[in-house]
């Protein structure tokens, strides 16, 4: 269990810290942004910093969800960690979509006609489905708590 918790915490740290690269070294982060926003070529450092800062918001949601799963593994009696993680995973694609719209708008400010994109993908749907699965596990655990089982008998 220690290895799983360690991997979850490490993944959370990497996910949260990754956009800081764009805040600290914006021009070296440009290649990353061009993969997602090909129209961003020509964006200045301030635009890149703002886009990276926005991505920090959505990545923090994902990182917090991973930390909460790790906390649940450490304290399986405290199912509220599982519920909070599930709710964060369900909301992550929605928050990411909003962040992508604002990042797209920011990174295309230098163009004559700004480009704003909104993309829904199977990857985003996966986060929602996984969050719903965790929420289902939480509800099942709540229904089968020992105190509830004893009162039904």
Image (spheres, rainbow, N blue to C red):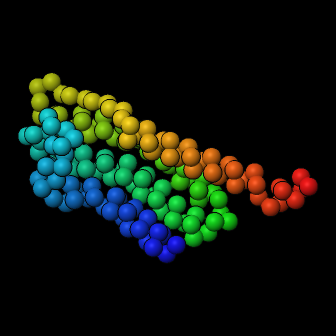
Residue 81: x %, y % from top left: 59, 59
Q: Is residue 23 visible?
A: yes
Q: Is residue 100 above or below residue 146?
A: above
State the count of labels.
Answer: 0
Extreme residue in the top direction:
113
Query: In the rendered image, which quarter contains the C terminus?
Result: bottom right
Q: Is residue 17 above or below residue 36?
A: below
Tell which of 34 and 6 is nearer to you. Answer: 6
Asked if residue 110 lies left or right of residue 85, the reply is: left
Extreme residue in the bottom direction:
2
Q: Is residue 47 visible?
A: no
- Tell me the quarter of the picture where residue 98 sits: top left
Residue 12: x %, y % from top left: 39, 62
Q: Residue at x 59, y 56 (%)?
A: 82
Q: Residue at x 8, y 40 (%)?
A: 42
Asked if residue 140 lies left or right of residue 63, the reply is: right
Q: Residue at x 22, y 59 (%)?
A: 21
Residue 121: x %, y % from top left: 36, 35
């Amino acid at each position: 269990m220690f290895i799983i918790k360690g991997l979850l915490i490490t993944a959370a740290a990497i996910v949260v810290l990754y956009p800081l690269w764009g805040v600290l070294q914006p021009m070296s982060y440009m290649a990353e942004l061009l993969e997602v926003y090909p129209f961003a070529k020509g964006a200045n450092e301030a635009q890149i910093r703002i886009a990276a800062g926005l991505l920090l918001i959505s990545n923090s949601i994902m990182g917090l969800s991973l930390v909460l799963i790790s906390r649940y593994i450490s304290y399986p009696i405290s199912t509220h960690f599982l519920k909070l993680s599930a709710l964060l995973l369900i909301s992550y694609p929605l928050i990411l979509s909003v962040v992508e719209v604002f990042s797209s708008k920011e990174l295309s400010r230098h163009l004559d006609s700004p480009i704003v994109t909104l993309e829904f993908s199977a990857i985003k749907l996966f986060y929602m489905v996984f969050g719903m699965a965790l929420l289902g596990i939480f509800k099942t655990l709540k229904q089968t708590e020992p105190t509830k089982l004893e009162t039904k008998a």
